[in-house]
Amino acid sequence: MTRRKKAFRVLSVDTSLGSPGIAVIDVINGKPKLIDVSHVKTKSTEPIALRTQIIEAWALLFIRKHAPYDLIIREGFASKIPHTNYTVFSAWNAVDRALNSFGLKVDDSIGQASVKKKLLGKGRAEKEEVEAGVRHFVEWGEFETFDESDACAIALAYLIDKGIIAKEEVE
């Protein structure tokens, strides 16, 4: 009789100030299974401090709901535009504060081009292509936003990169 291995649980975050996405994927016997996804939208008319509080509260509830995690990752980010850095890193900090409430931290990151390269075999892709790539690996109803499918893509690409799941040929 074959024993089923314990699930390897991954929390993945696609961070932005306007609409971050988050996903939980379990890997069981080398196969990814999407457990849950979420996103939250903030308003550009709201102060950044309020927007980050909204993101932190949303992340806190999602993180608590699905803990514990074996791996926590997010998409890497770099910009030469100071205001863009400020907004994205403000959102990063909000997620970090939520994680820190549980004694957790982000373990690693993967760059945007690497996500697309690992998942789709090319470094540039439209949001619809990324979502289709995600659906090649996991079953899910409708993603409410591309931020949700992007959060899944980040996890899947990282898992492929580290050899935790096998990359199948994407048609």
Image (tube, grey):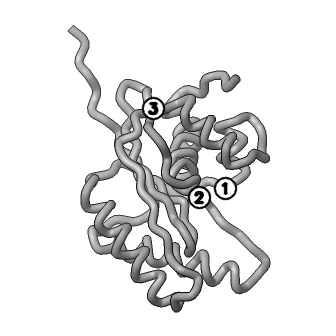
Q: On the rendered structure, is 103 left or right of 169?
A: left
- Give residue 57's position: percent from left, percent from top: 34, 75
Give, as a three-letter code, the residue at label 3: Glu
Which residue: 32% across, 69% down? 60
Which residue is at 47% across, 53% downward? 12
Q: Nearer the viewer, mark 1 or mark 3?
A: 3
The mark lying in front, picked from 3 and 2, is 3
Q: Position of residue 146 (x, y in %)?
A: 58, 53
Side of 62 where 91 appears, left or right? right
Count of numbered labels shown in the rendering: 3
Sequence-wise, the earlier of marks 1 and 3 is 1
What residue is pinned by disc 3? 139
Q: Mark 1 and mark 3: span between their CA atoms?
A: 24 Å
Could you classify mark 3 by the number of other residues whose Cα lies within 10 Å: few (under 14), some (14-19), or many (20 or more)?
A: few
State the SS at label 1: loop
Residue 127 vertical position relative to residue 169 in the rendered view, above or below: below
Check whether the beta carbons of the residues at disc 1 and disc 3 lie within 8 A of each other. no
The extreme top residue here reads 1
